[in-house]
Image (cartoon, rainbow, N blue to C red):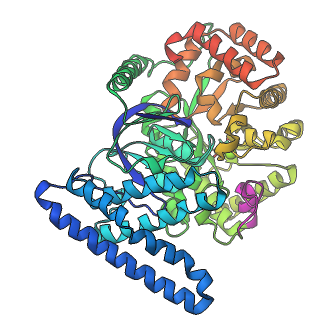
Amino acid sequence: MQQLKGIAVSPGVVIGDALVMDNEGFRIPRRFVARDAVEDELKRLDAAIQAASQETERNRDSVARQLGEQYAGIFSAHLQILRDAHLHRELEEMIRERHFSPEHAVSRALRRYAKVFQSLDNHYLAERANDIFDIEKRLLRLLLGRRREELSQLTSAVLILAHDLTPSETANLDRNFVLGFVTEVGGPGSHTAIVAEALEIPAVVGTGPFLTDVSGGEQVIIDGDEGFVILEPDEATIEKYTRQIEQQRSLAVQLQSLNDLPAETADGARIRLLGNIEFPHEVALCQQRGSDGIGLYRTEFLYIGADRAPTEQDQFEAYAEVVRAMQGRTVVIRTLDLGADKMQAATPHIDVERNPVLGMRSLRLSLRNVPMFRTQLRAILRAAALGDVRIMFPMVSTLMELRQAKMVLADVMEDLSEHDIAFNPELPVGMMVEVPAAVVMMDQFVHEVDFCSIGTNDLIQYTLAVDRSNKDVANLYTPSDPSVIRLIAMAIDTARKHSLPINLCGQMSGSTTYTMLLAGLGLRSFSVTPAAIPEIKRVCRAVTIPQCEEVARRALTMVNARDIKSYLKEQLHKVVPELVV
Ligand code: PEP
Ligand code: MG
């Protein structure tokens, strides 16, 4: 048994068989072979080693010819490994005695070698581990050939272990078969994490390197609540987690009884509880759990898997589906927030940026590409004729930028009027408050918009100068930081002073740890990931506003993120102990 610690990004515990993905999406489908197939499997391995050696020789000769002998040395080293008698004996023993498939044997043996290199205290030798991965990849390609299977063709339930998954790879996971996933890299606020939550797939990211220890087929536990990953767990651990899964199931059933009740505090304050969605199908989850509307519809996810930009009609249809399904309840549609780790592939015209999160992202990108922006605005305005739609601009940093966006919107409205196309001319216009500059300038922004929504995912990143998708700085990325809490308090105060409706739609609002704090700071509208609706409702119904105000007052006196978080957890435990693990 081996236990890893990563970052918990999508809650839930799952137990199942590992499917290992490498960077090229290889999976190792079979672990064992039938006893009578051993001789054939050994022949298959032999053929693959021969073919790999020939390919490597050809590469060596061609590089030597073109660049000189000294550059071909790397291939000679690969050849030496491929021809190593000790390796051959080891592989044969695994297949003959333990009935491993050649793929599994190759992966297991070579990853073990690589691990030895990686652990050496010599940078040059540690780097040689990459050569071993190269050989593994070559052999697997030859062995798997056409049998290489895609993630989209899964036929049995698995837990995916990968170096990394992009947001679009994550969005394409088949929820019927992927029970959970773990990635070596990735951070707490990444869009991969957000998509995992939207799909309600338990996930842990940022564990650091461990794929060299697994080959696929092993039993694994993913604890998406605490961020643990356990490889080949022992009986006692399986039992412990099985109990936890059962407890979670019964808590979920208990919480279902709140579905038809409002998020109202024990002393009668009504909290608006909205859902964040990426995909139209999530509307059903929001409806089922009794949300008051959609507080954030992230439209950039329409670009997922699309080989061309969505047309006005594509966009209109997606928005209309959501608006109709919400039956008159509010739907806040956010304009495109492309760029950074979101759908980079959708913005190929942007040069590679050194600091994409500080670059041509989001509203800046829409204002740079006005035809694309206008297409989206037309689709939103048309969908607004069908229900209570509001539009929200993301990542607003300056007043000028906001005014520019509003001008384009006014122009598009004029155009639609001229052509007698139905739309809502009274469409409320809002902005995300997710750049510290927007908080500082809130007293000005309040005169320019009909509502605003705090985006803590980015606000944390930009306040603390910490990349939301980088595991190495994840310890700094927390909503508990006093600077973040003060900025949120400032934004809420200013908005309330000017009677501007304010919501919070970052992941923070879906964490029960912060519900009392946010309500105590005066927030009365939360937009959360659909899975979090029942728990947040539970907390709201268990507390009073004076109680929350006291929690907020105390938290604001603290100067250390860790103290604030443990204080908030303690307070939560007092009111709803069953929600604190
Ligand atoms: C945020 O930044 O908090 C937010 C809700 O937007 P996104 O996560 O899509 O950047
Ligand atoms: Mg954001």
Image coordinates for residue 225, horizontal then vertical, percent: 50, 29
Image coordinates for residue 229, horizontal then vertical, percent: 46, 36
Image coordinates for residue 113, horizontal then vertical, percent: 46, 56
Looking at the figure, which quarter contains the N terminus? Answer: top left
For this rendering, which residue is in front, 530 or 273? 530
Range of residues picked out in magenta: 352-368
For this rendering, which residue is in front, 157 or 213? 213
Residue at screen point 51% across, 18% down? 581
Q: Is residue 421 above or below residue 550?
A: below
| Ligand 2's quadrant | top right
Whether residue 358 appears in magenta in the rendering, the answer is yes
Residue at screen point 68% across, 33% down? 504
312 lies left or right of 202: right
Residue lying farthest to the bottom in this orientation: 65
Whether residue 510 appears in magenta in the rendering, the answer is no
Image coordinates for residue 547, horizontal then vertical, percent: 69, 8
| Number of marks in picture | 0
Residue at screen point 36% across, 66% down? 140
Q: Is residue 75 above or below residue 477?
A: below
